[in-house]
Each structure stands twice: as structure tokens, then as C-alpha cells.
Amino acid sequence: MVQPEGLDGLRPARLKVGVISAGRVGTALGVALERADHVVVACSAISGASVRRAASRLPDTPIQPVPEVAAAAELLLLTVPDAELPGLIAGLAATDAVAPGTIVAHTSGANGIAILAPLTERGALPLALHPAMTFTGGDEDITRLSETCFGITAADEIGYAIAQSLVLEIGGEPVRVREDARTLYHAALAHGSNHIVTVIADALEALRAALQGQELLGQELIGDDPGGIAERVLAPLARAALENALQRGQAALTGPVARNDADAVARHLAALDEVDPALGEAYRTASLRTAQRSHAAPEVFQVLTPAIRRSVASDEQGGGVSE
């Protein structure tokens, strides 16, 4: 494998960076790398949103076709969605657009370096650099990178040294992820971030229904737009729960399942089912997992498990189960 020219110990030389494509992640990383004195020499952008984002975040960087971006780069960032990554790599390999010795890094969480094999076989140095962060397209994306862990996977210690140095330069924290553990790593992050959004959205829907028509004099009406009364009620509690879970683990758990209050759980399910059966089912599923983690009492599982509830109801109606 070709060692990049100018590699000084564990610190990469100032690199010419190419970004494919100018999405939320790619432009945020481009800005962060430029602040570390690397130079984004070219980027690709197809959609109107990407063109505007590139012009705003990387105003001195020319927008060029993908092959030209690849040819100009010493560090090539592939920041396309996961589904587009195999096709992009295959196209770059087929056209010999990537010069031997180029560091090629993708930002996919679920993939390691195996997906880069067509380019690795042509002399590229493969890296997986996944920022464990959600990106909104706002200025906060760039700020958050300095507080973000990056899941890194490389082919050898030279690759790991380069990946580690790049991450440290932009203020992040590198974390090694085995090639065969990338899918599990990504699943854990999706479960811990994407599903939080769903749980919060469900909670807000139920809370809006509970508060509707109860506004104080002079207070805004309960609405569906973000940032309203429901969000203000839930925000301190949700933030505290998250911080407590990160700092105290399972010991942070509170609420009716943890207290083995099966009657309260049953009432919650009935109330949520009345608003929307899908809300009740989501609560049931999450509560069942909570009950398993907290080793809840049998009566809690009876409330949460439909088969058990039907069996109990049948026993009560029929006076027992015949043998």
C-alpha cells in the first residue's frame, strides 16, 4: 500500500480534499478540515440544495463532475447516502478516476472498508470515517463535530494512524470499530438516536391531546408546530432522563414499570389507545422491553403481553384451564 506523500509521524500533511457530494455531512466535514488547514479543492453537487450548501459553506471550492473531484484529491471523501455508495465506488474504479495512493474515506456507519475493495485494488488507501452524529444542515453541524466520536475502520496501522489524526485534527474522538462489527455498531446508533425521535414525537402527540383546550389565559393554543407548550413541558424531563441514563445506566429508570405498578401501566395503555392505537402499541412495545430490563413483576408482563392477558381473561371467565 502506498504511503501518502508528506505523512509526518501520525499527522497527515496538509491534504488536497475532494468531497463527493456536497450534502450536510460532506460540507460540514469540508469546513472542519479546512479549519485544520487542509484545502477542499473540489466538490460535487447535483441538486439545488447541494449547490447552495456548497456555495455557503465552501465558497472558494469549485463544483466539478465526480471524476474531476476524484482526480484532484489526495483525500477523497465519499459522503453519499449508503444506498448510493456501491455504485459510486464501482464507477470510480471503472474509470480509474482515483489515483494510486489517494486516501479514500467514506462516512457510512454500516460499512467498513470492504465496500472500498474496487478502489483498494487500484492502490487507494481505504478508510471508514463515520461521525456518530445527526446532521440537520444548520451551523450546529460543524460545531457538533468537535464533540463527536467517529467510528473508524482501516486496513492496517498506517490507515488507523491517518484516520485517528484526521479525526483528532477536527476535534473529534476516534473509536476503532472492527470490520465485522460495523452493522451492529450502526444498529446501536440508529436505535439510540432515530428511535428517540420517534418516542419523543409519540409522547408529544399524546401530550398535545391531553393539554388540548386547557390553555391558561393569554397562553398560546396547543398546536402541532414544534416549539410549543407540549415541547416545553416535555423537554426538561426528556433531557434529564437522557443525561441520567448516560451517567447512571439502568439505575436511572423510573416510572410505573420500574415500580411494578401494573394498574398504572394498564391505564396508560387504555388512554393512549383512545388517542391512537398505534401510540398504545408503541408504548406497549417499549414498556415490555423496559419490563424485561428491570425484571418487572409478573403482573406487569400480564398487562403488556396480549397472549398472557387473553389467557388470564379466559381463565377468569371459564373458571380455570381444564387438563
Image (cartoon, helix red, strand yellow):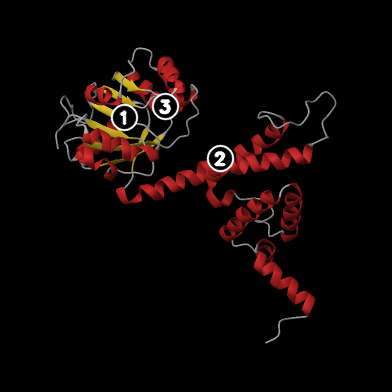
Give the answer, above or below, for where 262 lies relative to 156. below
Local packing at callout 1 (Cα closer than 10 Å; few below 14, some 14-19, many 20+) is: many
Q: Residue 132, located in which quarter of the rendered image?
A: top left
Q: Is residue 179 above or below residue 313?
A: above
Q: To which quarter of the image does residue 6 belong? A: top left
Which label's residue is closer to the chain start, 3 or 2? 3
Mark 3: few/some/many CA within 10 Å (<14, 14-19, 20+) = many
Q: Quadrant of the N terminus?
A: top left
Give residue 169's position: percent from left, percent from top: 32, 26
Q: Position of residue 188 (x, y in %)?
A: 45, 47
| Closer-to-camera residue (310/44) | 44
Locate residue 55, reporting x and y percent: 41, 15
Disc tally is 3
Q: CA distance from mark 3 to mark 1?
A: 11 Å
On the image, numbered disc 3 is attached to which residue?
A: 23
Give the image location of residue 183, x and y in percent.
38, 49
Relative to the observer, which residue lies in front, 113 or 295?
A: 113
Q: Label 2 is placed on what type of residue?
A: Glu
Mark 3 vs 1, N-terminal side:
3
Q: Are marks 3 and 2 in contact (CB under 8 Å)?
A: no
